[in-house]
Amino acid sequence: MDKKQHLFLWGVPQTGKTTLIRKILTAHPDWVVKGVYSYTDFVAGQEDGRVYIAPVQYCSWYKKEEALVGLRGPKGRRGNPQAFDEMGIKILEDFKDADLLIMDELGTMENKALAFQRAVLQALGRNTPILGVIKRDQTPFLEAVRHHPKVATLEITPENRDGRLSEADVFVSQSVSAFRTLQSRPSCGAVVVRKVGGIWETLLVKSHGGHWSFPKGRQEEGETQEETARREILEETGLVVRIDCAFRRELPSIEINNPRRIVCFLAHYVSGKARPQEDEIGGVVWAPLDEAPKLAARYAQDAGVFLDAITYLNK
C-alpha cells in the first residue's frame, strides 16, 4: 500500500470537519476504529478553555487528569508537550486490530511535543488507514504531515461540506477495503543466520514495544512468500540474504482473533551492514543463535522457531 491511503480534512474553524468524520463512522459500524481526538472544557468564570485528548476507543488505563494538552483563550493557544508525549503516544500506540485510525485534530499545540510528532509520522508510514483533521497553520510538523507520500488532504467549507462527505467516504472506504485485503495476506520473514568463528549467530529485530524476534512483513500483491521475506529483511535491516526454503514454519498471529498467518524461513546472510528501518523497528542486533529462544521468550511461538532453527542447522 504505497499510494495515498490517509485523508486529512482542513479548513476554517467550525465548518463541520469533525461532524463529517462522525457521519462516515456512523455509516460503517463494522469498522474497528481507534485513535485520538481532542475536546475543550470551558469552566464558568475562567477565560481559558482546557484542551484534552482522549482515545476514540475505550481504554481502561486512560486518565483525563494526565491528558490536559493545553489551554485556549483570548491569549491564544498554549500547549503542554509532556501530555502529548506521554498520553498522546500511549493512545496512538493502541492501534492493533484497527481498520481505521482517527487523528482529530493535529495543530500547533504539538509544536514542542517532538516525541508525539515522531509517533504521528511513524503511524503515517504504517498501513493502517488514518482519517484526521489538520489545522491550516504552516509549521514544520504540519507540513511534514501534509506532504507525506501517503497523505491526501481535502478542504472543507460551509459551501462544499455536504458534497465532500461522499468524496471523503469513498476515499476512506477504499483505504479500509485495501487494508483489510492486505491484512488477509500472510507476513513472511526468516531467521537470518551467519557463522562467525564456528558459532551460529542470528539477527534479531526489536519492535517498538520492546520485543525481540525475526524480521518479517506483509506479502504484497504478486510476490511469492520467499520474495516477501527477502524484501522485508532488506527493507527492515539492510541485509541481503539467501532464503533456505527447506526450512519453513507457519505460525498463527500473536494478536487475538487475527486470522493472519506468519510464514518463517531460514535465511543465510550474504552481504550488508545491519541497520534498523526506524519507522518499522526499534533496533537490530546480531546474537548467538543459542541465546535467541530466551531473548524472544515473550512469545512462545517465536522462541519455538529459533529452537527449530537450531535443530535444523545442527543436523
Image: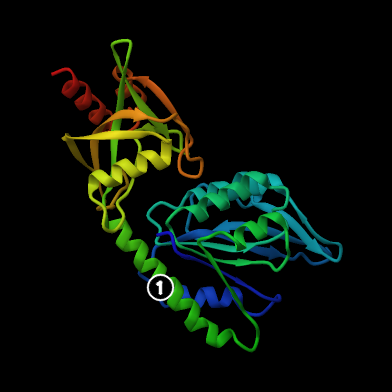
Examine the rendered structure and indicate whether residue 83 appears above or below residue 178.
Answer: above
Examine the rendered structure and indicate whether residue 296 appears above or below residue 79.
Answer: above
Q: Is residue 144 left or right of residue 216?
A: right
Q: Give the x, y percent position of residue 34.
A: 47, 59
Q: Secondary structure at mark 1?
A: helix
Rendered-image quadrant of the C terminus: top left
The image quadrant that residue 271 belongs to is top left
Q: Is residue 138 left or right of residue 162?
A: right
Front residue (pair 67, 298): 298
Q: Give the x, y percent position of residue 186.
A: 26, 50
Q: Give the x, y percent position of residue 202.
A: 33, 24
Rendered-image quadrant of the N terminus: bottom left
Residue drawn at point x = 69 percent, y = 44 percent? 82
Whether residue 246 is visible here, answered yes or no, is yes
Q: Give the x, y percent position of residue 268.
A: 28, 28
Amino acid, disc 1: Ser
Circle 1 sits on which residue?
Answer: 173
The image quadrant that residue 140 belongs to is bottom right
